[in-house]
Image (spheres, grey):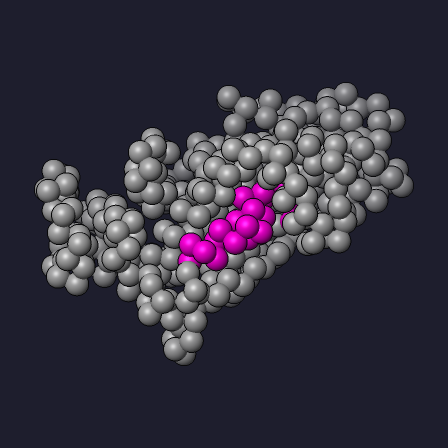
């Protein structure tokens, strides 16, 4: 069943297949439905959520089958970072598996760079992914808005500019003539760094300036810090805390200080529109489990820290010291809010630094919170923008 069929069935069609939904008719009658696709999809999502609650909608074992007739495989991608804590918990506690049901197999894909995840998504090898807004924006641009949409947030904060303790750098202006690492060109931290340089009157060497911006994996950045072959790095957690503890690093700028209310999207959830169109029920179940994971992390801080630490050790082969994990989580807010305004700000920054020439109107459909808000409404929580 695709999204259009779902809208037709739940919004306009007969409810004979699921008679339990008949009790929803009075509520539907009170909902003003405008005759346009956006309103229809929203109503369809609300009804699909209601069907999930009642246990009478699509998405059961018979529905979740592949074209070959076997169990459907859902490919979920994420990074081994603290900023992807909701993914670590959702997979580690079995929350995603339980929500999707026994007829669905989860294929976990772990990446260290956003561009690699985007390429896999383009190839149909990723259905749902945790990723930074930078790569998500780049993927959206490259596909002319066809390959992905952002449907939720996962974390805010958890990124900073760290300098070597003996570098003498005190602020962004001090990066003139220095070597600065970012996880990847075009990534979220790269965009933040280049915008901060521009604001300080500096530019990178590839743009005719004096700051050498170097894309490195965070693990290589740590090694180069120790060797004194880098002066600074703009990285996410847990690498901020690791650079401070293991490489004599010093935080000179917590990125939260650049944003209103100290909130900005560090990790978002993307989905392939084709997958969402074919399996709206599974996307809703996944999002519901994501909200549960966010709630559990925020309500069980000590237990969550232990699980996140264990998952990172399994994925990377290295355990984080307790103080590093504590510092990483303290700098990171786990949230399901995609913080749309900050994502759109990243698109504006991308344009200012020359990564894109698209106007704001090109990103009007990048963030789609209809499914998330339908689930939040069910929980009697305020929606997100």
Q: Residue at x 77, y 38 (%)?
A: 321
Q: Is residue 371 above or below residue 348?
A: below
Residue 15: x and y, percent? Answer: 14, 58
Q: Nearer the viewer, residue 182 or 86?
A: 86
Tell whether 8 sits left or right of 291. left
**Magenta span of residues:** 80-100
**Residue 34 in the image: x percent, y percent?**
15, 42
Residue at (83% x, 44% y) in the render: 223
Residue 190: say if magenta: no
Count of numbered circles in the view: 0
The picture quadrant where one finds residue 364 is: top left
Q: Residue furthest bottom?
A: 68
Q: Is residue 42 left or right of residue 331?
A: left
163 versus 70 height, above or below: above
Say if 151 sits above or below 59 in the image.
above
Q: Residue lying farthest right?
A: 227
Instruction: State the image coordinates of residue 276 (x, y, percent, origin top left).
Output: 37, 57
Q: Is residue 301 visible?
A: yes
The quadrant the N terminus occupies is bottom left
Front in this rendered view, residue 29 or 347: 29
Q: Any magenta on residue 82? A: yes
Q: Residue at x 47, y 62 (%)?
A: 74
């Amino acid at each position: 069943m695709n999204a259009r069929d779902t809208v037709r069935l739940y919004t306009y069609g007969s409810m004979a297949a699921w008679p339990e939904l008949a009790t929803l008719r009075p509520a539907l009658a009170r909902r003003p439905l405008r005759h346009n696709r956006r309103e229809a999809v929203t109503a369809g999502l609300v009804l699909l959520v209601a069907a999930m609650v009642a246990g009478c909608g699509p998405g059961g074992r018979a529905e979740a089958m592949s074209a070959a007739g076997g169990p459907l495989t859902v490919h979920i991608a994420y990074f081994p970072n603290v900023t992807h804590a909701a993914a670590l918990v959702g997979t580690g506690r079995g929350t995603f598996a339980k929500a999707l049901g026994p007829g669905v197999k989860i294929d976990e894909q772990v990446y260290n760079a956003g561009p690699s995840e985007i390429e896999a998504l383009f190839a149909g090898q990723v259905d749902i992914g945790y990723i930074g807004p930078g790569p998500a924006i780049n993927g959206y641009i490259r596909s002319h808005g066809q390959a992905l949409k952002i449907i939720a947030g996962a974390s805010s904060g958890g990124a900073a500019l760290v300098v070597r303790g003996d570098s003498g750098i005190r602020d962004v202006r001090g990066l003139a003539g220095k070597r600065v690492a970012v996880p990847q060109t075009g990534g979220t931290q790269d965009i933040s760094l280049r915008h901060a340089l521009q604001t300080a009157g500096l530019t990178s060497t590839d743009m005719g300036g004096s700051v050498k911006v170097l894309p490195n994996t965070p693990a290589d950045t740590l090694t180069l810090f120790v060797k004194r072959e880098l002066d600074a790095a703009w990285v996410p957690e847990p690498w901020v805390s690791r650079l401070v503890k293991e490489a004599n690093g010093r935080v000179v700028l917590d990125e939260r200080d650049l944003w209103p209310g100290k909130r900005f999207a560090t990790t978002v959830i993307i989905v392939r529109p084709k997958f969402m169109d074919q399996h709206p029920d599974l996307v809703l179940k996944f999002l519901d489990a994501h909200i549960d994971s966010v709630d559990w992390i925020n309500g069980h801080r000590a237990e969550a820290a232990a699980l996140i630490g264990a998952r990172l050790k399994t994925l990377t082969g290295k355990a984080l010291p307790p103080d590093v994990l504590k510092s990483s989580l303290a700098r990171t807010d786990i949230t399901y809010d995609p913080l749309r305004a900050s994502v759109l700000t990243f698109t504006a920054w991308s344009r200012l630094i020359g990564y894109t020439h698209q106007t704001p109107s090109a990103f009007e459909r990048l963030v789609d919170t209809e499914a998330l808000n339908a689930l939040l409404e069910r929980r009697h929580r305020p929606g997100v923008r």
